[in-house]
Image (cartoon, rainbow, N blue to C red):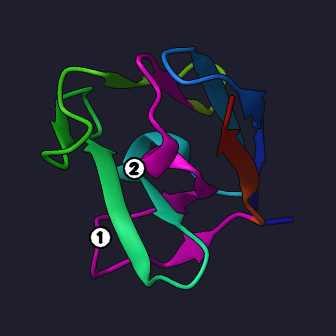
Amino acid sequence: EVQLVESGGGLVQPGGSLKLSCQASGFIFTAYYMTWVRQAPGKELEWVSTISRTGSPSYEDSVEGRFTISRDNTKGTLYLQMDGLKHEDTAVYYCARGVYGAISLRGQGTQVTVSS
């Protein structure tokens, strides 16, 4: 089955860290750019980060320097290390196949809540 399954979300205090994982299956992981997007309550879907097939990352300005995207092509897994979390990072985070604007598959999402 072609799917993306996220894990690793949860409740964290401001300034804390979380690491999200996304397990891909059913397609050739190495053939695709991979992306993290998020959706906060009452807001539109927002691009967070993208990684190329060979591991070159790009980040939305508000997460640059705090988040790190990575991938393990041998495991078909995408990661998002989130440090220095802020209240405004609270959202459902989705793993997606492709670049933002040309996403062809998206996971079910994992909730990240930043609260004291």
Secondary structure beneath label 1: loop
Span of residues in magenta = 79-107
Whether residue 112 appears in this view of the structure is: yes
Q: Residue at x 50, y 43 (%)?
A: 87
Above or below, 29 against 2 in this view is above
Q: Residue at x 62, y 69 (%)?
A: 106
Whether residue 72 appears in this view of the structure is: no
Circle 1 residue: 100
Decide: few, some or many residues near mark 2? Use Cα within 10 Å; few <14, some 14-19, many ≥20.
Answer: few
Residue 93 point in image, percent of width and height:
60, 54
Residue closest to the far front? 116
Give yes or no for residue 29 being in the magenta stretch. Answer: no
Q: 66 or 106, which lies in front? A: 66
Secondary structure beneath label 2: helix
Image quadrant in which you'd find residue 42: bottom right
Residue closest to the far right? 1
* Kind of residue indicated by mark 1: Tyr
Name the image quarter holding the C terminus. Answer: top right
Image quadrant in which you'd find residue 94: bottom right
Circle 2 residue: 31
Spatial CA distance of label 1 from label 2 is 16 Å
Residue 19 point in image, percent of width and height:
62, 21
Residue 100 point in image, percent of width and height:
29, 70
Name the image quarter holding the N terminus. Answer: bottom right
- Residues at circles 1 and 2 in contact by the CB criterion of under 8 Å: no
Image quadrant in which you'd find residue 63: top left
Mark earlier in primary sequence (1, 2): 2
Q: Residue at x 44, y 34 (%)?
A: 86
Decide: few, some or many residues near mark 1? Use Cα within 10 Å; few <14, some 14-19, many ≥20.
Answer: some
Give yes or no for residue 105 being in the magenta stretch. Answer: yes
